Amino acid sequence: MYIKQSELFTGTSMDFVKKFMDISETASHQKGEILFRENDPARFFFILLNGCVKLSVGQPEQVVYEAKMNGEAFGWSSLIGGNVYSASAECLEATKLLKTDRDKLARILEEDVENGVIFFKRLAATLGKRLLQTYQLITPQKED
């Protein structure tokens, strides 16, 4: 099962994973396709099944992250109360995704509080790692 490759589901029940899969759809995209733009309505949450997605912000666009590993999640603005995406997402190669409607996911997370807490803890850890990576990119490196 592809979804178990995602750290977000570590520690959650198989029933929770099944419910997540039941409300999600697999979507294939070509190189160059824009999945969403910064400030578009945040309606979906995505998990990379294979391929590569560039996340960028601002004008001109600055790359802030590239999702390359199977199981990586993005589009998280849709889950944390954001009405719009905080970045743009573009496929850098042919890409396959798991696409989940935020309202359907919210219902599952509210109905299964125990697994919902685990899911959000994992999401917070993922976002924390990305934030640290971003800090490393923008912090000037000291020379020896």
Image: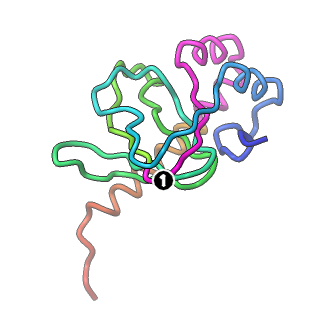
Where's the N terminus, which quadrant? top right
User: 85 or 109, which lies in front?
Assistant: 85
Instruction: Look at the picture and state if 73 lies above or below 23.
Output: below
Q: Check the image and name the residue furthest to the right.
A: 14
Q: What x and y, as percent, mark residue 29? A: 51, 40
Q: Is residue 10 left or right of residue 64?
A: right
- Total labels drawn: 1
Tell me which corner region of the image, top left, top right, bottom left or bottom right, holds residue 115.
top right
Q: Is residue 67 in the magenta section?
A: no
Within 10 angstroms of label 1, few (less than 14), some, or many (20 or more) residues? some
Q: What x and y, as percent, mark residue 133? A: 41, 58
> Residue at left 58%, top 54%?
69
Q: What x and y, as percent, mark residue 44? A: 49, 24
Q: Check the image and name the residue furthest to the left.
A: 59
Instruction: Look at the picture and state if 75 lies above or below 57.
Output: above
Q: What x and y, as percent, mark residue 59? A: 16, 44
> Residue at left 75%, top 29%?
17
Tag 1: residue type?
Answer: Glu
> Residue at left 66%, top 44%?
6
Judging by the rendered image, the residue that carries numbered circle 1 is 93
Tell me which secondary structure the magenta stretch mostly adopts: helix
Question: What secondary structure is found at the residue carrying circle 1?
Answer: loop
Q: Check the image and name the residue furthest to the front.
A: 30
User: From which residue to which does the magenta span run?
Assistant: 92-121
> Residue at left 23%, top 48%?
61
Where's the C terminus, which quadrant? bottom left
Q: Is residue 53 left or right of residue 109?
A: left
Instruction: Look at the picture and state if 94 lies above or below 15.
Output: below
